[in-house]
Image (cartoon, coloured by chain):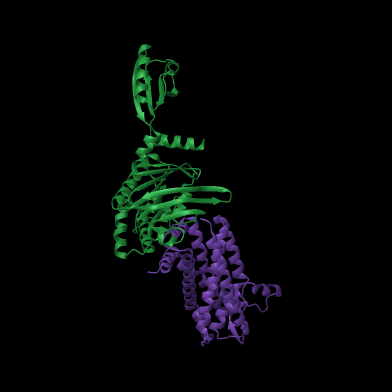
Chain colours: A green, B purple
Amino acid sequence: MYCIEVKSLSKSYGDFVAVDGIDLKVEQGKIFGFLGPNGAGKTTTMKMLTTLIPPNGGEMNILGIDGIKSPLEIRKKIGVVLQQPSYEPTLSVEKSLEKYGMMWNVEKKIRKDRVEELLFAFDLADIRKKKNDDLSIGQRRRVQVAREFMHDMELLFLDEPTVGLDPSARRGLLDYVKGKVKDGLTIFFTTHILEEAEYLCDDIAIINRGKIIAVDTPGELKNKFGREKTIKIHISEQKEISSLLSCIPDCTIEYDSGVVITVRSSQSEQVLQDILKILASNHIPVEDLSVVPTSLEEIFLSVVKNSNA
Amino acid sequence: MHEIIRLVNRNLTISLNMGFVIWQIIFPLIYIFVAGFAYTALIHQVPFGNKTLDYPAFIATGMIGFNIMNSTLISGIIIWNDRRHGMFEQILVGPFTRAQYILSNVYTIGIIGLVSAAMITAVGYPLFFKQVEFNALTIPLVVFASISGSILFGSIASIISTRLKSSEGFNVVINTVFLFFAFVSTAFYPAQGAPPILSTAFYFNPLTYLVDIVRAGIFGYFNGLVATEMVILGVGAVVLFLVATKLLSKLEL
């Protein structure tokens, strides 16, 4: 079953097309990563899916509800952590959580228990009495994300939730989210940090200039776009080896300092053998050698670059 | 619990703090008991309809309207703060509609306006109790003035908060507009005896109508002018509320 089904969804502001007829399907109980460079249309898509702004065209079905006809019904079943900070400056951390639960009509007893759980889960217990206005950006962000777990939901939208968090808080948040997915929650997650997407997401879509340019699992994206591997060779003395390697087919030289050379190839095993033969026949000793699979970040950059071209 | 009640609960929690409540009582008390008695040497008595009021009684009843106006500034401040701190969007991606958000602000203003009027009536009562004339219209008039005045001034503050983008601009405009409302009105002095231009200007100010209706209720003096003022205040409140609602519902997200 799909939690989100979108067909030809589009949004324009005057002549500017922010989202250009995208199609998306997000399965229930999965974490769906939504990646794209700045201004690609991620936040506009998120705002349409959360019914904050209406689309100009297309169809949108969220949790089996028509997103254009019944936006309020959708909002009652989803949680949203927006990219921009949101907080009540005059309230303390625990009061913020408590009041947010009240706004979602969560029973008082349940609210009390959840406040305690979230204060500890998000490492906020020590600052529970501090006012939001007095918190650091990272602390405020933690409160903002924690607050969303005060109420029950079937689908959670997280728009760059780890912005401003230190690495340990970031990992803590991602693990908490993963735990919630095991309980059946579906998550739509946008981020700039590709390691996070790789760590967290079951499926990933890449958007650029308002269009979806790739959708798949991180593994499949690597298979499709990341067959190339990077071969890094460190030789012990300065040599001009680029010209020696230029005759090898499917071998792109990316970097050559004279001592360190980096090449990319989709036939890495064959190319590696060829390189070693050439180096041996020219009596060039190898000090270190490594073969690195293409990271999601490299795939992202390459897919976006191709799409721009 | 209904969505609007939850939002009103939230509005009251974030906007009311001990400092605000104390200020809302202390500020008018200074006017009533310091300015009221100090100015007695200059303005001993004030004609009001068919009776003559002591100046402290006159200013105490004026302060009811003044306090309603001041406290309803909260409405603008709630919207302003919600926009500034991202809560406007956050609420609208929650289980609420824009209409519920707007109505919750109206109810918040209404509650604060009524409580404010009640507080000042209680503290000012010793000054005007001798001249109070209760009749069937007293409480309805004061309640009508409090609610329609709250909605009108709350709407003005909301309109300002939707139009301005910088906090400096918001503060300057709010303070200037409300300073005009406060001092170019019959809250502190009567229209009779003021230079004609000024006394005419008093009647371009909704606070004058609000204060006149409150006084009419408390001192039991109701005539055609008060009825006209009620119509103007009521219509003004409805029109400005509709404008504020329209602007708020068009606010880009």
- Of B156 and A210, the residue lying toward us: A210
Can you say whether A127 is above or below A209 in the image? below
For the point 53% across and 62% down, the residue is: B248
> Taking A27 as reference, is B150 left or right?
right
Residue B20: horizontal and vertical position, in percent? 46, 66
Residue A163: horizontal and vertical position, in percent? 42, 45
For the point 53% across and 71% down, the residue is: B151
User: Is there any visible trace of residue B30 in the rendered image?
Assistant: no
**Quadrant hosting residue B219:** bottom right
- Of B59 and A183, the residue lying toward us: A183
Residue B36: horizontal and vertical position, in percent? 56, 75
Can you say whether A83 is above or below A102 in the image? above
**Quadrant hosting residue B62:** bottom right
> Taking B200 as reference, is B65 left or right?
left
Residue A211: horizontal and vertical position, in percent? 48, 44
Can you say whether B126 is above or below B164 in the image? below
**Quadrant hosting residue A238:** top left
Q: How many labels, in total?
A: 0
For the point 62% across and 84% down, the residue is: B224
| Residue sticking out furthest to the right | B196
User: Is there any visible trace of residue A177 in the rendered image?
Assistant: yes
